[in-house]
Image (spheres, grey):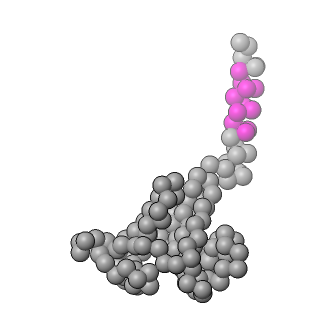
Amino acid sequence: MNLTVLIGSLAAVFALAAIAWLLGMGRTPRIADTAQAERLARDAHSGFVPEGAAVSRDGKAALVAGRDGDFVLLREHGANIAARVFRRAPDARRDDGVLTVATGEKLFGDLRLDLGEADAARWSERLGSNRSEAAL
């Protein structure tokens, strides 16, 4: 292989990698705040009117409550944010500052929200499951 072809090939590979980086490809999405979580929930569920959201401290997941008693769970899924809609409060358990919401789906999995003790307790009560892991 000639040196010019090798250098040209490497330059092309680095150029494509730079373009992918500039376009944001390969980055893991994060949910920045409650406003973004509410917007994502409205996008995922037609007619959804949010009345509060809890976003995990790491930005990987969120729980959004709706006016009609429905809930939207959001979580990172590859390069996107996946959503699941629940017509009633999903089952949840609280362990200190972490709220774990059971989705009943193997592919989506349970949602772990690191909210801090006060917010985890408030959302656990809102979901109707005021239990802690230690009490189970």
Q: Residue at x 67, y 53 (%)?
A: 24
Picture coordinates of residue 56, whole percent (x, y): 47, 70
Residue 38 is drawn in which quadrant?
Answer: bottom right
> Is residue 80 within the magenta segment?
no
Residue occupying the far top of the picture: 1
Residue 8 is drawn in which quadrant?
Answer: top right
Camera sees residue 96: no
Magenta-colored segment: predominant secondary structure: helix
Quarter in which the C terminus is drawn: bottom left
> Is residue 12 within the magenta segment?
yes
Q: Residue at x 49, y 59 (%)?
A: 105
Badge count: 0
Horizontal side, residue 131 vs residue 27: left or right: left
Q: Residue at x 69, y 36 (%)?
A: 14
- The boundaries of the magenta stretch are 6-16
Picture coordinates of residue 103, whole percent (x, y): 48, 65
Camera sees residue 86: yes
Picture coordinates of residue 67, whole percent (x, y): 60, 87
Residue 69's place in the image compared with 25, above or below, is below
Residue 39's place in the image compared with 59, above or below, is below
Quarter in which the N terminus is drawn: top right
